[in-house]
Amino acid sequence: MFRPLALFIGWRYTRSRRRDHFISFISLISLLGMILGVAALIVVMSVMNGFEGELRGRILALIPHGFVDVPVTARNGAMTDWRERADEIAKQPGFVAAAPYIGGSAMLSNNGQVRGVQLWAIDVAYEQRVSDIGRHVIDGNYGALPQQPFGIVLGDYLAANLGVTVGDTVDVILPKVTVTPMGVFPRQKRFTVVAIFRSASQLDSSTAFIRLADGQRLYQLGDAATGLRVAVDDLFQAQTLLSKWNAAQGNQFVVRDWSRTQGSLFAAVKMEKTMIALLLLVIVAIAAFNIVSILTMMVNDKRADIAVLRTMGARPGTVMRIFVVQGAVIGFGGIAIGALLGVPAALYTGDIVTFFESLLRTRIFDPQVYFITRIPSILVPGDVVRVCLLAWGLSFLAALYPAWRAAQIQPAEALRYE
């Protein structure tokens, strides 16, 4: 006899033609639901991975992986030995480079237009080791910033809101005051726009860069800096590396990584990914509940067969395994087909959407409104494995109750009216 018996009979029940067409219809609906749920989960999770990757790539091109600041209790709140500290950090394992900065909130004004910004005073020679600002410049010459006294680099949205282009001037107003015999005045200086950048992120509307020397004059720091902007090999290890280095220095600095400055944005994306995955998981759950209905009706249809098997010596556990196998086969078929459809769809989501855009002559993401023009997608094998295992687990659990009911059938009761 074929061994194992439960696998043999369960597989035959799955392949056999149904006398009850309603059961066949429910089986098809369950299979389609499992296919749709698994494929949709794979595609949506890949698209969310793509959006997260886009945000990380665009934002962290301008924002470094970490910061090393002096405590506010330090003298003048400034780092006077920033050159030695930058060289020391660059030599540590896991670190790439460090660059000085002076940063703070400021206001930019031009022709009655006022915008609040995050103002960064940087040393271009050092900064190019920790960020890619120069690669995102769309107008002007970023390399001319070191030679341009009181020059400024603006994001394109910020420049458009202020109504300025390269060569125009803007007034930089700091939240500090200067006391003169004429009274107390806010500290401000007129800067010339030397370049405009575009990172296709919210930083384009709220970020400006000036020379470190100009920042030192504005903030009256002499040759000091507020702190260091740091780049590391693995951005997810930034906080660990910074904390370890700071501990070796006696915890005399204040260290923070990119997750402290931009972490809320990535946390929101991660939460959206989780919530969408849970919502789509409902489709898989419905398909699993359909398996319960299918197997329950199948058990009622096969009562006589179950009774015969029991009289021939089949144990309740064997009967139970027969229907568990049948439910698992239905679930596995839907999962396999869903994965085979979902993986290529996730890999070519951008191309598929672009095709339908050209076919329908429309744009899903208007470049005048959105930062991206193409749906990004990053397929992570681990996500595919988790989706398939989760769907498989739901299918297996759905088969347990009907299989248990089948194992409780008494041969005498089932054959009484046969």
Image: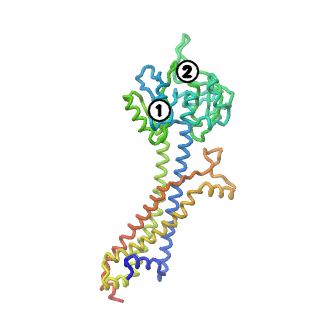
Residue drawn at (49%, 80%) of the image: 21
Question: Mark 2 against mark 1, which lies toward the viewer?
Answer: 1
Judged left or right of residue 249, residue 338 is: right
At label 2, the amino acid type is Leu
Q: Is residue 368 above or below residue 27?
A: above
- N-terminal label among 2 and 1: 1
Tell me the colour scheme of the image: rainbow
Q: Foreground residue, 92 or 41?
A: 92
Q: Is residue 370 above or below residue 141?
A: below
Q: Foreground residue, 163 or 137?
A: 137
The image's mark for residue 218 is 2
Q: Is residue 131 above or below residue 367?
A: above
- For disc 1, the marked residue is 91
Image quadrant where one finds the N terminus: bottom left
Judged left or right of residue 167, residue 46 is: left
Assign a secondary structure to mark 2.
helix
Residue drawn at (55%, 19%) of the image: 217
x and y, in percent, of residue 130 in the image: 53, 34
Quadrant of residue 193 in the image? Answer: top right
What whole-number distance in Å separates the C-alpha atoms at marks 2 and 1? Answer: 31 Å
Q: Foreground residue, 277 or 255?
A: 255
Quadrant of residue 72 in the image? Answer: top left
